[in-house]
Amino acid sequence: MSFYGFSQENLIDSIQIDQIPVVFLKGQIVNGFDKKPLPGAHVFNMNSVRGTVTLNDGTFSIPTRVNDTIFFTHLGFQSVKIKISNDLLKGNELEIALYEKAENIAEVNVKSTKLVGVLEIDARNVPTDTYSRIHINGLPQTYEVGRPREKTYNSTTDAIFHPIDFVYNLFGKKPKQLRKLKEMRENHQVRDMLNEKVNREVMLDYLELSQEELSELLEECNYSDYFITEASDIQIIEAVLECYENHKAVKKGSTKKKE
């Protein structure tokens, strides 16, 4: 005989949410300086894990409920996050103004490679990729991972649990965040949106982490600096979830994930 347990608190929350009617929030995103429409801006519902992209005239429509949190983002602009109130859902279209953000451009050193015209010699002088490549389940691409770093541990137990215990404990305390990250990974429309983004804002907001904390976490999972800075948001989400699943398997005494 099997018994299944349910969290009464989660069940009540789910019922209460289902009783709130869904209303389509409509509006337009514009440039805050010249009021011109911003096509291609991302509109993301943090609660339902659903998103959309503005049309050529900057307009959008997204299903929402009262108390949902909506994220408005566009490359090169400051993001805006609003919480939906009853007043916002009374039928009037919303206008969201995004303002360009200043970016500090760091100095870049470009190294040249001199070619002599002899294939065998030139081939030896071509810079090689110093990163090994890995494949993350669920994604067709391969990613670069940094070389293993030497770490000093006081005991065998410390060596097993210290590096990424943080991510295991994080999702243990925030199961809803873990579920939403998985939903983001599985929703094709959201995947396409996050595959174009590299600002980590949505993910950082979910996990309540700073950019520095996220970078440190990925370093502990042995990802290279190149991957941490260049990977898209969906690739970062895949990496964090993979890191969590692997560490969970180690906690349970097996490094093989069950299919």
Image (cartoon, helix red, strand yellow):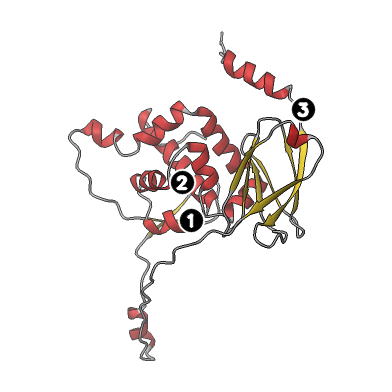
Say which mark, if any, is on residue 195.
none
**Nearest to N terminus: mark 3 or mark 1:** 3
**Please, what is the three-letter code of the amino acid marked with disc 2?**
Ala
Residue 253 in view? no
Q: Are marks 2 and 1 in contact (CB under 8 Å)?
A: yes
Could you say which is closer to the camera, residue 133 or residue 44?
A: 44
Closer to the chain start, of discs 2 and 3, is 3
- Furthest residue in direction bottom, as rendered: 117
Quadrant in the picture for the N terminus? top right
Measure how far apart labels 3 and 1 are at the Cα level: 37 Å
What residue is shown with label 2?
239
Q: CA distance from mark 2 to mark 1?
A: 10 Å
Residue 237 coordinates in the image, percent (x, y): 50, 45
Q: Is residue 130 left or right of residue 26?
A: left
Can you say whether 230 is above or below 23 in the image? below
Is 13 positioned to the left or the right of 251 in the image?
A: right
Disc sitting over residue 21 in the figure: 3
